[in-house]
Image: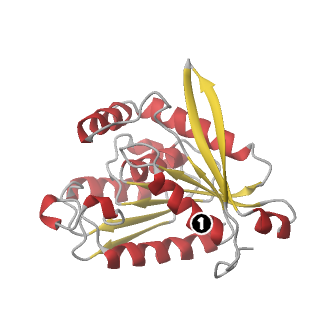
Amino acid sequence: MVAGTPEAKAEVRTRVVSWTSNGMTFEGKLVLDPGKVKAAKGRLPGVLIVHQYMGPSDYEVMRATMLAEFGYVAFVADVYGTAVRPKDKQEAGAAAGKLKGDRAELRARLVANLAHFLAEPEVDRAHIAAIGYCFGGTAVLELARSGAAIAGVVSFHGGLDSPTPADGKSIRAKVLVLHGAADPFVKKPDIEAFIAELDAAKVDWQKVDYAGAVHAFTERRAGDDPATGAAYDERADRRSWEAMRTFLAEVI
């Protein structure tokens, strides 16, 4: 269903998808290659991408473009709403922290993003996965806990706490966690609780640790100093992307 390599003449296009909920406006971005959609007779498997704590950015669009080149329809989610576009780390921390502290609201916004993605005509609704980075990695796990009918979720250097372990029983997706083995922000007790939650719910899960990698290892803008706790790691970035591709090929 999905080509193994991108075609040289791929023409990836982006379309804005807007909606209003509870007085807030949200703006997702659908990214696809029309040629691949036509070749697939109108529908392609879809990947929802949830942003890191700074909000939707060119980074997620870049990842969506990479996925579109391989034959997926990608959707860059907007979990914050257009009125919230953090200008610095402090604002981003507050925005992400607010939603992490209200998991019901976080799930509701994720489910809304997914619903608008699925409403697009180019999306094969039976073959859907979600991926996320940092805050987004935490978020896609919450989307899975919501009971969303998606085939798989992939967390890149996301938080792995387990605030409501009983909700693991609602997970219908397969789970792939791509984790920096030296990430100082994800504590061992959280990892253990997370794995216990998935095991108790008999979830099909995988966790890959990348030696020496810290938080945000896929993001060049994180810098190159692991001593800060967040830094880009080319090897972990490359390996984790390939692990995700293999996973997506299996589940959707």
Helix, strand or loop for disc 1:
helix
Given the current orientation, which residue lies at the most extreme left position?
227
Would residue 167 appear left or right of 12 to someone viewing this image?
left
In the figure, residue 199 lies in which quadrant?
A: bottom left
Say which residue appears at 55% left-offset and 77% top-offset: 246
Mark yes or no: residue 177 visible: yes
Q: Position of residue 215 (x, y in %)?
A: 26, 60
Q: Position of residue 192 (x, y in %)?
A: 28, 58
In the figure, residue 44 lies in which quadrant?
A: bottom right
Please say if 1 is above or below 154.
below
Say which residue appears at 65% left-offset and 42% top-offset: 16
Given the current orientation, which residue lies at the most extreme top position?
23
Q: Is 171 or 86 nearer to us in this picture?
A: 86
Q: Is 24 or 173 nearer to us in this picture?
A: 24
Would residue 244 appear left or right of 54 to someone viewing this image?
right
Q: Amino acid at mark 1?
A: Leu
Would residue 225 appear left or right of 128 to someone viewing this image?
left
Q: Position of residue 251 (x, y in %)?
A: 63, 68
The residue under label 1 is 67
Q: Quadrant of the N terminus?
A: bottom right
Mark yes or no: residue 153 visible: no
Would residue 127 appear left or right of 180 to someone viewing this image?
right
Say which residue appears at 50% left-offset and 31% top-offset: 82
Say which residue appears at 22% left-offset and 59% top-offset: 230
